[in-house]
Image (tube, helix red, strand yellow):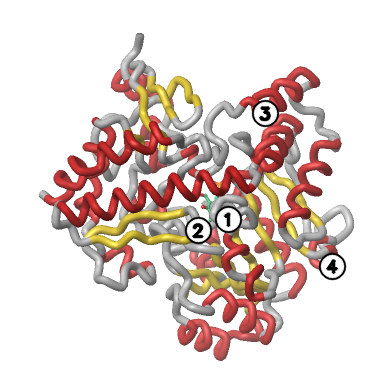
């Protein structure tokens, strides 16, 4: 049997930093990244045979837990029929129909990653409006395409980088970054550049500077101000889609308030753990995409049949009982977390939207409202907290700027293991 240290050393010899996505490197928490060998239900098992309750869930996709029998069976069936054909398959239509039955989109275009979904959404918005500028919020992450890396939260924040080398000033200059939860900032930007703004892109609920609750009416305000100025609203549900609620982040805002965004971006849950993501919207907007329209987009593995099967089986089984279980497990963990931190005397706020939540250390009673608040927290408390949880067999996101992910497979035993681990971790965070 190998060790995590040996696996990491071997990886570092052939892969930059030993990882294919920076936050996996444990840079901000220290220690040896765990190399997982298998997963089942709510658990991950590393190459040393140590088992962890998984509160990362592959950063969101594993809503049903690992190796859900219906998903595994659907994938096996798809694999037996062939891995990839480079043609259309009926599975794409079936998954698109399923997505359209949950949220009001008329057309869905599949891609392989959330990054591609938002990148294409931006190109589409520019193509539809004939305008150049994009407005994004500081601390929102929309993947790693050039124009969207400014003040991008998440992995960039974890590494304390302002943005990324290699992004040209020209690319960055077409993105205007404004503070989240600030209607005034947005009004000022529209007053100055309204004629040139193609779109505002937002996370339905920001989850990449920790979870940040949109202020009262803030998302509705985004809908209104974009419509007023002829700009599009790009609604990034890559992380929240079909996870925050059965109808995603939209279920908390647009669905209850009676509005829809222009272009939706999905990922994570719709691939059920396989590489699949999508953008969607009205036929009027989406039919600007090639081959019907002039906005080009393509992908060798887009709509891959195995990924479509995993996503379809996941969404099909994500019924009321699934969301109720995810909500119950996430409520129990959140309550345990806040009582453990309170007992240890650690100031904190639990940030929450639907079943998604995160913790911010040392914040004011108001919690985190924007990126400046998120960055101003006592980040140093996260590493000892994380390491203590890890030693107790709980795998948390190795960054304080990430949401905790719970699945429907998190049964009472898994939740109890998390609750039992929290007091010692809270004491460690208090040091
Ligand atoms: N948008 C949001 C809100 C995300 O959270 C992420 C990834 O975490 C992305 C886009 C990018 O997705 P991907 O990592 O699949 O490229």
**Residue at the image point whose x is 68% and y is 78% from the top:** 231
User: In the rendered structure, which disc, 3 or 2, sits on the residue that comes first in sequence?
Assistant: 3
- Mark 4–mark 1 Cα distance, whole angstroms, equals 27 Å
Secondary structure at numbered mark 1: loop
In this view, 75 is above or below 94: above
- Mark 3–mark 2 Cα distance, whole angstroms, equals 25 Å
User: In the rendered structure, which disc, 1 or 3, sits on the residue that comes first in sequence?
Assistant: 3
Q: Are dots 4 and 2 in contact, CB under 8 Å? A: no
Q: Residues within 10 Å of mark 3 (few under 14, many from 20)?
A: some
Closer to the observer: label 4 or label 1? 1
Q: Are dots 2 and 1 in contact, CB under 8 Å? A: yes
Q: Are dots 3 and 2 in contact, CB under 8 Å? A: no
User: In the rendered structure, which disc, 4 or 2, sits on the residue that comes first in sequence?
Assistant: 4
Q: Residues within 10 Å of mark 4 (few under 14, many from 20)?
A: few
- Check disc 4 and report the residue beneath it: 284
**Residue at the image point whose x is 57% and y is 85% from the top:** 190
- Check disc 3 and report the residue beneath it: 70
- Check disc 2 and report the residue beneath it: 354
- Mark 2–mark 1 Cα distance, whole angstroms, equals 6 Å
């Amino acid at each position: 049997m190998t060790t995590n240290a040996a696996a990491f050393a071997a990886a570092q010899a052939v892969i930059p930093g030993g990882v294919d996505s920076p936050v996996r490197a444990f840079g901000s928490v220290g220690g040896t990244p765990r190399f997982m060998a298998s997963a089942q239900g709510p658990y991950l098992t590393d190459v040393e045979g140590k088992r962890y309750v998984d509160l990362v869930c592959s950063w969101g996709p594993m809503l049903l837990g690992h190796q859900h029998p219906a998903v595994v069976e659907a994938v096996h069936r798809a694999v037996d029929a062939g891995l990839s054909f480079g043609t259309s398959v009926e599975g794409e239509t079936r998954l698109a129909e399923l997505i359209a039955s949950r949220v009001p989109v008329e057309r869905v275009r599949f891609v392989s990653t959330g990054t591609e979904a938002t990148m294409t959404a931006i190109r589409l918005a520019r193509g539809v409006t004939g305008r150049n500028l994009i407005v994004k919020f500081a601390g929102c992450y929309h993947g790693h395409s050039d124009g969207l890396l400014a003040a991008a939260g998440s992995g960039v924040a974890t590494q304390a980088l302002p943005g990324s080398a290699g992004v040209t000033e020209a690319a960055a200059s077409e993105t205007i970054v404004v503070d989240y939860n600030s209607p005034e900032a947005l009004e000022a930007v529209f007053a100055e550049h309204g004629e040139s703004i193609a779109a505002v892109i937002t996370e339905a609920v920001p989850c990449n500077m920790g979870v940040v609750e949109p202020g009262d009416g803030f998302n509705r305000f985004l809908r209104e101000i974009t419509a007023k100025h002829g700009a599009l609203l790009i609604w990034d549900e890559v992380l929240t889609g079909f996870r925050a609620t059965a109808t995603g982040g939209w279920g908390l805002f647009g669905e209850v308030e009676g509005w829809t965004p222009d272009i939706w971006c999905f990922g994570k849950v719709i691939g059920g753990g396989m590489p699949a993501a999508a953008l969607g919207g009205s036929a009027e907007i989406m039919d600007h995409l090639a081959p019907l329209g002039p906005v080009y987009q393509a992908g060798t593995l887009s709509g891959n049949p195995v990924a479509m099967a995993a996503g379809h089986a996941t969404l099909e089984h994500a019924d009321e009982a699934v969301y109720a279980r995810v909500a119950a497990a996430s409520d129990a963990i959140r309550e345990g977390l806040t009582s453990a931190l309170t007992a240890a005397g650690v100031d904190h706020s639990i940030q929450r939207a639907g079943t998604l939540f995160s913790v911010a250390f040392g914040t004011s009673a108001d919690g985190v409202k924007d990126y400046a608040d998120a960055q101003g927290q006592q980040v140093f408390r996260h590493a000892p907290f994380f390491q203590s949880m890890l030693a107790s067999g709980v795998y948390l996101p190795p960054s304080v700027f990430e949401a905790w992910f719970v699945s429907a497979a998190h049964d009472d035993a898994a939740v109890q293991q998390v609750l039992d681990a929290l007091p010692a971790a809270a004491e460690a965070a208090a040091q």
